[in-house]
Image (spheres, helix red, strand yellow):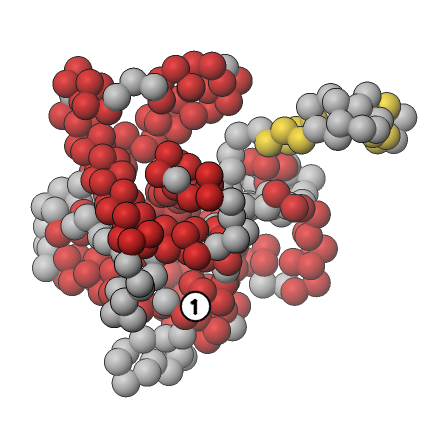
C-alpha cells in the first residue's frame, strides 16, 4: 500500500532534513520572542502544520512565520475533532457535510473557520497541481517526492489515482496527523516544564549526545536515549493518537471471550484512553510518570495494554 510505504520508518528517517528544517524555524521564532508571552501550544501546532504539509505534499504553508502561529487552525482542529467523533455514529451527516462546497461554507463562517477552510483549500489546490504534474511529466530529481507521486507510481488501479480519491487520501493524512501530533507534543512539553526534576533529567541526558557538524542528531541515536523515550511513551499513554472507540467486526464466525459468546457480525470496540487510564494497569494513571517505562521488563510486559496507535492489521499507518 503506497501510504504504508511512504510513512514507513525508513522513509521518515531518510527525510529527517524536513523535520530539522521546520524545528529550526520553530527554535528561531522562540529565540526571537524571549521575554515575550508566547502561546507554546500554538507554536507547536504551527510546527506540525508546516512539517506535515512539507513532508506529505512538499509545501509548508508558513504557519511558523505567522505572528500568532496560525493559532486559528489549531483551535479549529480541536472543534473538528468533535464533529469527526459525532459523524462516526451518524455517517450520513458526515457525507452530507462533505457535499457542501468549501467556498459556500467559508462565506458563512467566522474568521477562524475562514482561515481553516483557506488552509484546506490550499492543500486541495496543491494536490491537484501535483497530480496533474505527476501524470503529464517525468519526475524531476530536484522535485521533492510527495505522497501524490507515490500514489501515481503505485500499482493501484487507475480509478484510485483520480483526483477525488487522491484528494481524499491527502485530506485524511493531513487531518489525521494535525491534532494528534500537536496534542501529544503539547501535553509532553507541559508536563516536562512543569516538573523541575523531569526537566533536569531530560536535559542532562540530551547533553550526553554528540551532534553532527551541522548540529543535528540522527533518529537512531535519539531512540537509544532511555529517559527521552520514557517521556514520549508516557505522553502517548495520556494522549493516544486514537482517543475514540475503534470498532471491529468478525463477519463469518462467533467470538468467544471467557463465558461470553459474541455473535458473528457484532461490532466490538475498545477505547484506548480507558485502558491507558486503568489504575490496575498504570498506578496513578492521571499522573505523568516517565519512570513507568525505564524498566525494560515492565515495558515489555505492557505489550498488550499499551496501544497509542491501536494494534493488529489496522494499526495506524502514521506510527
Does the rendering let one see residue 34? no
Residue shown at the point (31%, 48%) measured from the top left: 131
Does the rendering let one see residue 61? yes
Q: For this rendering, which residue is in front, 195 or 69?
A: 69
Secondary structure beneath label 1:
helix
Q: For this rendering, which residue is in front, 249 or 131?
A: 131
Residue 197 occupies quadrant: bottom left
Residue shown at the point (34%, 31%) measured from the top left: 78
Q: How many marks?
A: 1
Residue shown at the point (59%, 37%) measured from the top left: 272
Query: Disc 1 marks which residue?
Result: 13
Say above or below: 53 vs 168: below
- Whole-percent x, y for residue 29 in the image: 15, 57
Q: For this rendering, which residue is in front, 250 or 84?
A: 250
- Whole-percent x, y for residue 18 in the image: 30, 64
* Crowd band around label 1 with a 10 angstrom C-alpha radius: few (<14), some (14–19), many (20+): some
Position of residue 65 in the picture relative to residue 135 (left or right)? left
Residue shown at the point (73%, 21%) measured from the top left: 266
- Whole-percent x, y for residue 175 in the image: 37, 38
Residue 251 occupies quadrant: top right
Amino acid at each position: 500500500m503506497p501510504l504504508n510505504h511512504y510513512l514507513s520508518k525508513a522513509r521518515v528517517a531518510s527525510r529527517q532534513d524536513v523535520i530539522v528544517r521546520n524545528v529550526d524555524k520553530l527554535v528561531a521564532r522562540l529565540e526571537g520572542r524571549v521575554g515575550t508571552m508566547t502561546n507554546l501550544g500554538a507554536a507547536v501546532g504551527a510546527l506540525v502544520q508546516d512539517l506535515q504539509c512539507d513532508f506529505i505534499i512538499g509545501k509548508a504553508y508558513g504557519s511558523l512565520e505567522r505572528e500568532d502561529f496560525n493559532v486559528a487552525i489549531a483551535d479549529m482542529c480541536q472543534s473538528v475533532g468533535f464533529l469527526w467523533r459525532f459523524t462516526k455514529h451518524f455517517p450520513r451527516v458526515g457525507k452530507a457535510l462533505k457535499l457542501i462546497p468549501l467556498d459556500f461554507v467559508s462565506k458563512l463562517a467566522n474568521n477562524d473557520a475562514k482561515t481553516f477552510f483557506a488552509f484546506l483549500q490550499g492543500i486541495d489546490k496543491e494536490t491537484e497541481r501535483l497530480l496533474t504534474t505527476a501524470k503529464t511529466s517525468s519526475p524531476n530529481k530536484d522535485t521533492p517526492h510527495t505522497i501524490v507521486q507515490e500514489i501515481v507510481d503505485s500499482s493501484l488501479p487507475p480509478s484510485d489515482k483520480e483526483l477525488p480519491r487522491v484528494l481524499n487520501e491527502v485530506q485524511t493524512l493531513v487531518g489525521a496527523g494535525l491534532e494528534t501530533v500537536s496534542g501529544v507534543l503539547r501535553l509532553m512539553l507541559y508536563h516536562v516544564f512543569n516538573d523541575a526534576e523531569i526537566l533536569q533529567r531530560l536535559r542532562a541526558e540530551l547533553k550526553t549526545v554528540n551532534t553532527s557538524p551541522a548540529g543535528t542528531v540522527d533518529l537512531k541515536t535519539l531512540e537509544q536515549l532511555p529517559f527521552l523515550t520514557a517521556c514520549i511513551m508516557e505522553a502517548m499513554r495520556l494522549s493516544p493518537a486514537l482517543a475514540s472507540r475503534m470498532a471491529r467486526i468478525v463477519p463469518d464466525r462467533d467470538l468467544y471471550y471467557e463465558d461470553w459468546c459474541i455473535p458473528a457480525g457484532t461490532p466490538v470496540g475498545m477505547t484506548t484512553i480507558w485502558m491507558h487510564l486503568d489504575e490496575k494497569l498504570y498506578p496513578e494513571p492521571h499522573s505523568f510518570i516517565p519512570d513507568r517505562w525505564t524498566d525494560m521488563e515492565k515495558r515489555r510486559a505492557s505489550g498488550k495494554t499499551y496501544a497509542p496507535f491501536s494494534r493488529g492489521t489496522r494499526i495506524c499507518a502514521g506510527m
